Amino acid sequence: MKKVFSLSLFTLVFLSACEKEIFTEGTTGPQGIPGEPGNANVRSGTYEVSEWNYQYPHYMANIDVSFITDEIFSSGVILVYVKRTEDSYTQLPLTFYWTDWYSTTLEVITRVGQVTIEWTDSDLTEPVEPGSYTFKIVAIESSELLKQSGVDPSDYEGLSREFQL
């Protein structure tokens, strides 16, 4: 018992004799180089599609999109828009009604690293090749970020303003 008491006393004296080192905040370093304006959680790109492959019943165009990661694919948001006029985009999917009885539908398939646009005519016959179209693809890391913003995802101009695209 005397040994335990002596050892405890020695430890207490030894530890209390140690000097405490107090660290203070250092000086501020130089200002870094300004980054690009925008939002780190949102990425976008514009893609011109002019090559389509026909696979019954639709034409398909694959767009490689490097910023669609596993994380974005599993818990984020991927939005695709087609350029309709010189200064406006419309969110896909979208159906064009050429007449009362004939239409074309553009749909989207997403996967990690790629977006596929499907162009299908209502009569399910091989349509004329779609030609050249411009698409905007927006990827948002977390679907919560979009919900918190309050922006209507079908409004590309509003989304662009909110996330500085």
Image (spheres, grey):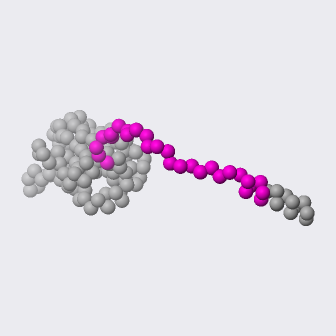
Q: Say whether residue 88 is magenta.
A: no
Quadrant of the frame with the N terminus: bottom right
Residue 61 higher or lower than 8, as above or below = above
Q: Say whether residue 24 is magenta.
A: yes
Query: Given the current orientation, which residue lies at the most extreme right position?
Result: 2
Identity of the residue drawn at 23% across and 59% down: 152
- Quadrant hosting residue 142: bottom left
Q: State whether the magenta stretch is mostly helix, strand or loop.
A: loop
Percent from the top left, x then y, of residue 40? 35, 47
Query: Given the current orientation, which residue lies at the most extreme bottom position?
Result: 1
Percent from the top left, x then y, of residue 86? 11, 43
Identity of the residue drawn at 40% across and 45% down: 69
Percent from the top left, x then y, of residue 53? 26, 37
- Quadrant hosting residue 54: top left
Q: Which residues are magenta?
A: 12-39
The answer to whether residue 99 shows anywhere in this view is: yes
The answer to whether residue 121 shows anywhere in this view is: no
In this view, the residue in front, 55 or 16, is 16
Identity of the residue drawn at 30% across and 40% down: 36
Identity of the residue drawn at 31% across and 48% down: 39
Percent from the top left, x then y, of residue 60? 26, 41
